[in-house]
Amino acid sequence: MLRMLGSARQLCDGIPRRDLLRIGGLGAFGLTLDQALRLQAAQAAPARGKGSFGRAKACILLFPYGSPPQHETFDPKPDAPSEIQGELKAMSTPVAGLQVCEALPRVARVMDRVTVVRSVTHPYPLHGVAYALTGIPTYTPELETRSRDARHWPYIGSLVDYLDERRTGETQPTMPRNLCLPWQLNSRTDLDVSAGTYAAFLGQAYDPLCPSFDGPGLRTSPKYTEAQPRQFMDPFAATTPEGRFGLAPPGRLTETLSPARLGLRRALLEQFDGARRGLEGSSEPRAWDTFQQRAFSLLTSTRMRDALDIGREPAALREQYGMSLFGQSCLAARRLVEAGSRFVTVFWDGYGQFAGCAWDTHAFHYPRLKEYLLPGFDRAYSALLLDLEQRGLLDDTLVLWMSEHGRTPQIDSKPQGAGRHHWSRAYSVALAGGGVPRGKVVGSTDPTGGEVHDTPVSPKDLLATTFHLLGISPETTVRDTQDRPFPIAGDGVVRPELLA
C-alpha cells in the first residue's frame, strides 16, 4: 500500500505548473516551480507479474470527446431497420465476422491488429471524462465543470506518472511521463469543461504536461447546432503543414500575462540558458535540489522539443496521418513514446463552441460524420497503428481508443442533419498493441446496438486492464491527504478477454 503525502499546490503567483509551461515555460524556475514539485515521496515496491503483465512500455490513449456512435464505428447493424442502421452501411474487415462502418476503409484494413469491445457499459450518459478515466465510483454533471473539486480522483496518466516515480525513484525523467495533446482539454471552446484529466489529491506536479499547437484551421467543419451563430476555421478539419507543437503558443499573450510579466519570464529564460551552459562541463552539483532540477529539465530539455517537432517527419508520412489536428497529434504521440514518454493522451475535443462540439452529434450527425469526423479518424488511427508496427513499437505500445459513452440506437430525425444522443448502456472501445489480442471481438449487443447482450465491460475494467498491461497492479492503492486509501482503478478488474 502506498502512502501519499502532500496536496495540490500552485506557484506563488497562483499559476499551476501546467499553465506556466503552456504559456511558455519562462518563469517557473526561480518562481518556485520547485516548491510545486516538492512533494514528499513514498517508496513503492517494484511491480511484478507474468504473461501479459507489463507487456506495454507505453500507452497512447485516443479520446474522442463527445462520444462517437457505436453504429457508425465498430458496431454497425446492417440488418437493423433504417431508423437504427442509419445512412452508413457496414464494411467487411480481414477478421471473419467483424464489420465496421463503411466510412472507415483504412481502419477496416487494420482490424486484424485490433481488439474491439462492443459491450462497454455504465450508468452515466454524461460527458463524464472523469468517470471514464479515473477510479471515481459515481458521477454528477456538476463535476464536469469543476476540475479541481476535492471529490475527484486522479487521472490515469497522473497515476502512471506518480507510481512510476515511486517505483524507479526517478524524479527527473529524460522525457515527461504524462502528456496530453494537442492542448488542455476543451481549452479552445467558449466553455472550459475539462474535468477528469488532473492529478487530484496527488498534487498538480502530476497533472499532464499539455503542450499547445500553433497551426490555424484551414476550413470550417459542419455546424454543431442549428442555433450556432457562426462557424469556425477548425484545425481538426484541416491545418497547415507548418503547424507545430510546443510549450507555448508563439507570439501570443494570455489574458493573465501582461507584456511586463512576459518580459520578466524572457529574462529568466536567458538566465536559465546561462545557467545551463555553466552546468555543462562542470561536475559540481550546484545548490539545486532534485525538484528544482526536475523543473529546469522540463523547461530546457532539447529531447522534449525534438520529440514534439513533427516537422522532422517526411511529408508523405504526415499526409498518411492526415493534415488535421487529430492526425498530427497522433503523429506527435508516436514521436513522444518513441522518445521515452510513458502515457500520452490525444484528445479530439471542441473548438470554438462547446455546445454540440467534437463528436457530440445531437444535430448535423451525418454531415459531421461524413465530412469531418470519420475521415479524420480513419486516416489517423490506421496510420498510427501501421507506423508503430513498422517501427517495431506496436507490441510494446498500448493504443486505446475510448470515450465517455456511446450514442442512442434510435436516430432522432428532428434536428437538422439528424442526431444521436447520449447513451451509456452499450458502446464500443478499441484496443491494439501492448499485450492485447489481434483481430478479436469481445462482447456483443442486441440487434439495435442499444443493450449489452453478453460480456459487459465497465470503464473501470478498462482502466484496470491498462494498468496491468503497463506493469502496475490495479489493486494498488494511494492515500489522499486525509490518509484515506483509494484503489487506482476503482472497482475495476483485469479482463482476461483483453489479454493476449
Image (cartoon, helix red, strand yellow):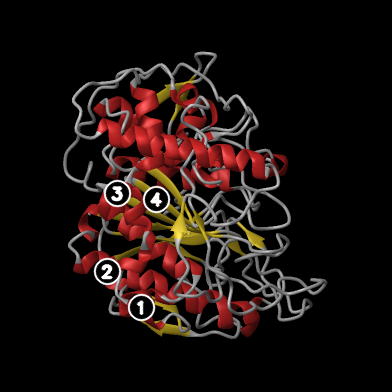
Q: Mark 4 points at which residue?
A: 344
Q: Mark 3 points at which residue?
A: 303
What is the CA distance from the residue labelled 4 to the residue labelled 3?
16 Å
What is the CA distance from the residue labelled 2 to the residue labelled 3?
21 Å
Q: Three-letter amino acid code at disc 3? A: Arg
Place of residue 390 in the rendered image (x, y in percent of width and height, measured from the top left): 20, 69
Q: Would you identify the image quadrant in which residue 157 lies?
A: top left
Q: Name the residue under label 2.
A: 387
Q: Three-letter amino acid code at disc 2? A: Asp
Q: Would you identify the image quadrant in which residue 4 lies?
A: top left
What is the CA distance from the residue labelled 2 to the residue labelled 1?
10 Å
The local crowd at label 2, few if under 14, some if 14 to 19, many if 20 or more residues have their Cα within 10 Å, is: some
**Residue at x 29%, y 32% (from the top left corner):** 278
Name the N-terminal-most of marks 4 and 3: 3
Name the N-terminal-most of marks 4 and 1: 1
Observer-side mark, 2 or 3, equals 3
Place of residue 418 in the rendered image (x, y in percent of width and height, measured from the top left): 71, 78
Place of residue 201 in the rendered image (x, y in percent of width and height, measured from the top left): 53, 26
Q: Which element is circle 1 on?
A: helix
What is the CA distance from the residue labelled 4 to the residue labelled 1?
20 Å
In front of the other: 247 or 372: 247
In front of the other: 103 or 389: 389
In front of the other: 42 or 442: 42
**Residue at x 72%, y 73% (from the top left corner):** 363
**Residue contact at pointers 4 and 1, CB within 8 angstroms:** no
What is the CA distance from the residue labelled 4 to the residue labelled 2?
16 Å
**Residue contact at pointers 4 and 2, CB within 8 angstroms:** no
The local crowd at label 4, few if under 14, some if 14 to 19, many if 20 or more residues have their Cα within 10 Å, is: many
Q: Which element is circle 3 on?
A: helix
